[in-house]
Amino acid sequence: MISTIRSDQALNLRERIVGLDRQVPLLDGRLAPYIFLDNAASTPPLRDVIEAVERFLPYYSSVHRGTGFKSRLSTVAYDQAHKIIGRFVGADLNINTVILTKNTTEAVNKLSYRLPIAPDSVVIATELEHHSNDLPWRDRAQVIHVRATPEGRLDEEDFDRQLAKYAGRVALVTVTGASNVTGFLQPIHRLARKAHAVGARILVDAAQLAPHRRVDMKPDDDPEHLDFVVLSGHKMYAPFGTGALIGPQEIFLQSGPEYSGGGTVDVVTLDEVHWAGMPDRDEAGSPNVVGAVAMAAAAQVLMDVGMDNIAAHEEALIEYSLDRLSGVPGIKVYGETDGAQANGKVGVIPFNLEGISHFLVAAILGYEGGIGVRSGCFCAHPYVVHLLQLSGEEATTWRTQLLDGDKSNMPGMVRASFGCYNNTEDIDGLVTMLERIVRGDYQGDYRLIPSTGEYLPANYDEIFAEHFLLED
Ligand SMILES: Cc1ncc(COP(=O)(O)O)c(C=O)c1O
């Protein structure tokens, strides 16, 4: 299995990723190939996406209101983008609408304003959520957080308990499709069936799921149907500022949008407003047409490559990574670490090295290994505190220090996350650097910056100008 994922066989996607050939400077002045393992934050663009944007830009014009050829063409492209994104998530567009947003965060916020929620209703979320699928609900309803198991999976017994306890009052069940901290996949269709059985709808935050696994909303009359899905273009190889909210038209047609203005109406008098149909009603102002084209182009490539092929490649890479990482002295990998569980998660691996700050590990990887990762709490504070098994007292001490402006002791982890183009050489590069860090074999004199918690090497000036700067 593992031997099937050498770089030349990595779905041939490597050559289709922009910037993989770009060398980056190291602390000692050498240039090195960049190993990008921070795909859970944002992926690099696909060349196909850039090409689609370049082909489109000579025709770019305003949509829906212009009568010229370019406007007419842009309107068709923009409408097609909605359809392609709808197809990407298996939505029936006779019933559902695709609303283009800036990103997942905006999409969840939009739904939190637009979903009718009765005063005594609850929203059932989970302890695994990214803040973007938790905080928007807190102002709108009582949010019940279903517990995670000690290793960080959803505690489905607790889910069942909460659902039964609040049956009849659950406005929404909202779950992440895949965790941005552990990569754990949720049984979204099983949860959908259970939510529907008590009359609730379900939202799946597919920000981390969509780049890795097929998202299928299923027919609207299927008990396992996903009512709402949100996702981000920049996490699926199209970093042009577009995300999407997909859900039933009838929900949005019940009321006016939370954001109004040009494009959202059919008729306005000085006293009356007649809102437009979907999705115009919920896409106020001039939309990001280029972003829509880019996101749709990316969705089309992922569908053409086949999400099942991407998943198979990634599972093999996860298995390889867990195996290689287990040999690093003093490493603690969070979540289940058994390679055999690779099909239960997407390529996101959080870890710590014993006795070394996660901020420091991430800094050394970046400055001396040319390896891009992320460290900290990944916008999922409750989940990370749970995974780290911090006592209540430890968590309180840290929060107090942080609120006083000192992030020196901020708990966290290092996160390596894969895209569809990563290969075993990338993992080997990571493991080699981690082994060096454990041996103390690094050069920089890293200084802690208490206000951010980051470590920066002393006496080092970044040389961005040789790579890219808008002005010197
Ligand atoms: C699971 C999950 N949900 C939501 C978000 C927010 O996405 P965005 O920053 O594109 O709004 C992220 C981003 O990391 C995420 O991983």
Image (cartoon, rainbow, N blue to C red):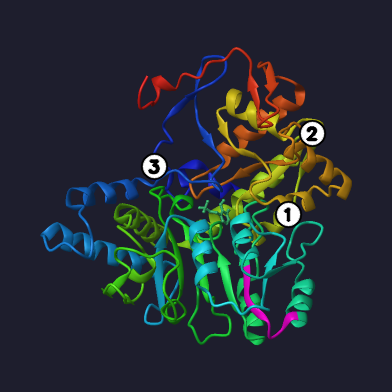
Q: Earlier in the sequence, mark 3 or mark 1?
A: 3
Helix, strand or loop under label 3: helix
Answer few, some or many: residues within 10 Å of disc 3's Cα (few below 14, many 20 plus, some between 14 and 19): some
Residue in the image at 57% along x and 32% along y: 371
Range of residues picked out in magenta: 166-174
How many marks overall? 3
Residue 319 in picture, x, y percent from top left: 66, 50
Location of mark 2 (residue): 329
Q: Which mark is residue 3?
A: none
Determine if the magenta segment contains residue 103: no
Q: Residue 434: which quarter of the image?
A: top right
Q: Earlier in the sequence, mark 3 or mark 2?
A: 3
Residue 118 in picture, x, y percent from top left: 61, 80
Location of mark 3 (residue): 15
Helix, strand or loop under label 2: loop
Q: Is residue 382 left or right of residue 211?
A: right
Answer few, some or many: residues within 10 Å of disc 1's Cα (few below 14, many 20 plus, some between 14 and 19): many
Location of mark 1 (residue): 383
